[in-house]
Image (cartoon, rainbow, N blue to C red):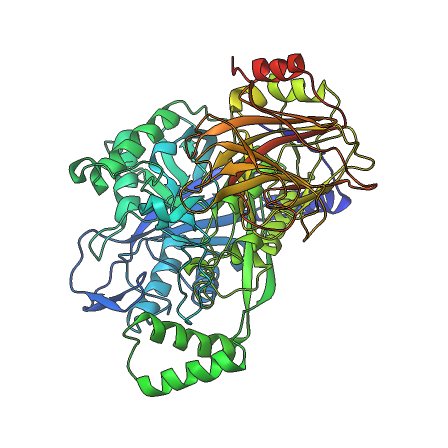
Amino acid sequence: MRTRISHTRTTSSNRRAIGGALLLTLLIGVPAFGELRVGAAVTDVSPTSFPVLINGGMLSRTAEKIKTPVEARALVLDDGAERLAIVVVDSCMMPRPLLDEAKQLAAERTGIPADRMLMSATHTHSAPSCMGCLGTDADAAYVPYLREKLAQAVAAAAANLEPAKAGWAVENAAEFTALRRWIRRPDRMDVDPFGNRTVRANMHAGRVWDDVTGESGPEDPALTILSFVALDGRPIAALANFSMHYFGDEAVSADYFGKFRDGLQEHAAPRSIPDKPPFVAVLSHGCSGDIWRRDYTKPVPPPAEDHTIDSFTQGLLAIAIKGYDAIRHEAVSDIRMTESRMTLNYRVPDAQRLEWARRVVSEMGDRLPKDTAEVYAREQVLLHERQSTEVVVQAVRIGDMAIATTPNETYALSGLKIKHQSPLNKTMVIELANGGDGYIPPPEQHLLGGYNTWPARSAGLEVQAEPRIVEAALQALETVSGRTRGVLVSSRGPASDAILAKNPAAYWRLDDMAGPRMIDAGPHARDAIYEPGVVFFLDGPRSNRFCLNGETNRAAHFAGGRALARIPDLPESYSVSLWFWNGMPVDGRGVAGWLVSRGRDHGLDAESDQLGLGGSNAPGRIIFQHGKDGDHAPSAGTTEIPRWTWNHVVLVRDGSHVRVYLNGTVEIDAAAPADFPPRFDQIFLGGRCDRMDGWEGRIDEVAVFDRPLSAEEIASLARAAALD
């Protein structure tokens, strides 16, 4: 776990609200404040007329039958002062206007305020379309039917309220989720629907290893369960949350979400109890915008018979049951919910793109798009017409447990930002809640392009939408908890302690969740700057040595950008220690990539130093070069370093003597002039100072020393990282 610093705050408005709730309790006779009651219900939302439009694909399609029912599963919670509803629906996505109407209808029937209702989609791609997106329109007959069913679900759950206790579990289900968005090599970029070669990252690019350099972000392996039982221990409901896109199933169906909840329901409450509502299991969608089930770090997919929707669900369910059975339920004294709304702009087309789009749409007439170009032409016209939209962000607190929402297909990194900074350790994040406002890539991901960034209703919000929505979620969590958010500091294991013990001039752990600041973890506060073209929070090296208590060490992935640092008065004798992970095939270019450069930006001075990894000139071997290309031949090591492996390198310059250590052993021993001019104090990470052959891969745990490290000091770093 990361170190979390938070503070509790109580306000006079909170005290007034509590007092008012107590008075209301006495006047109308509802349960006393502090007694949690929970009700749950299931409403079938399967279509009754066919064919029905199915959302989730690039082009429109229909279904003629129901394979498995699609449902709305609702919970209502009441503590005597607050009443709220949570509804999870088997739908690809649902538009905010439809949900606003359904909430208002439910409010009229139940008295629950509309802004105390959370309604989210499971994101099954085999459900009826209630929202126009890409090449599919909303099914006109299904939309009013779903609106009525959502209101019915809330009312049915409210009718089942009874005293309850709550509990929480989190299990690691990493085997069942993985990154689907991979970064392409700079020489293997793809073309976007507008004819421009902009695609540095895209979904499923990891199928072909030779085309890619690595994943574009982290995954969130947490399978979270919020459980409610009656006072006698009888199960009432369980709300699970997991970050994995749909599996893929024949329409109409609930995909793996339905199979999972059926299995959990059979385990928790295999028999009905007379005169008692049935147990309701729910699986909500975690932050899965860049997530899918296939792990592209493995060379071949598993055999089809070992990777069916049933085998996937059964494996995930086994982990869920383990966590569910261990839950300890406790009384909950109070609940609280808040909602905020904000207007966000769309990324609308410029005049040239709009002219192209209107021409294509005019040629289409009244028919739906038939190919990707037509889809995105129509989307440009729609974005231009709309210009902006309203989005909804919510937070719910149930005792010491919390739920935050986004109305988007949210990257796993965004969900981790919310969880890691939440004022409450027990926090789940439900995406596609209260709207279907498309992908919100973190800002740095926009530069890499790809489907998740192409402007459309499915990915059209402004570049800064992600940080704004994350901030709104954190503010909402602060409101419902009465506490300030946590301050994150990576724990320090023996390997990081060993670095700090040697008093580095700067020590960057590269565990940042966003740029542009690269924070110095040492005492000198020499923060550096990430350029565009770097992505964050990937798995780093040796988590059990650099961190504590099972925390994952984190690293940055460089994909065309560098990090720029300045070490004032850096002498001619200095050292740089870092860990690296190369994603570039070494036969792809002359130099696989440069790791460290000391020089002036945009230039390559005769006095500069560069450390990198050889390509066709020295395949997979560490190289050191002083000065301009051609002035001095690079010195190369002898060890070939496998791609996609973590390695430790230390560059030591002692006057004109240069040594390079690889994993604790001398790899290069060379002479190079020590002729640095005054104020030659810029260090570049992930690229050369002249921006040639930038690093394509991860870098971590970078320490700069204003002196040459001794062989014994380097050996001690290796021992601390368990390299010897």
Q: Quadrant of residue 14?
A: top right
Q: Quadrant of residue 308?
A: top left
Q: For this rendering, which residue is in front, 152 or 607?
A: 607
Expressed as whole percent of the image width and height from the top left, the position of residue 578 reads: 60, 30
Q: Is residue 139 above or below residue 88?
A: below
Mark yes or no: residue 397 visible. Answer: no
Q: For this rendering, which residue is in front, 16 or 121?
A: 121
Q: Is residue 399 left or right of residue 85?
A: right
Q: Is residue 634 left or right of residue 19?
A: left
Question: Quadrant of the image for the N terminus?
Answer: top right
Q: For this rendering, which residue is in front, 191 or 30?
A: 191
Measuring 22% from the left and 57% from the top, which residue is drawn there? 252
Measuring 52% from the left and 53% from the top, which residue is drawn there? 445
Q: For this rendering, which residue is in front, 60 or 455?
A: 455
Expressed as whole percent of the image width and height from the top left, the position of residue 309 reads: 23, 42
Expressed as whole percent of the image width and height from the top left, the position of residue 423 reads: 63, 37
Q: Is residue 629 left or right of residue 84?
A: right
Expressed as whole percent of the image width and height from the top left, the position of residue 214 reads: 43, 42
Q: Is residue 310 left or right of residue 412?
A: left
Q: Is residue 473 above or below residue 178?
A: below
Q: Is residue 478 above or below residue 199?
A: above
Mark yes or no: residue 117 visible. Answer: yes
How many tags in the picture? 0
Measuring 43% from the left and 29% from the top, which residue is drawn there? 640
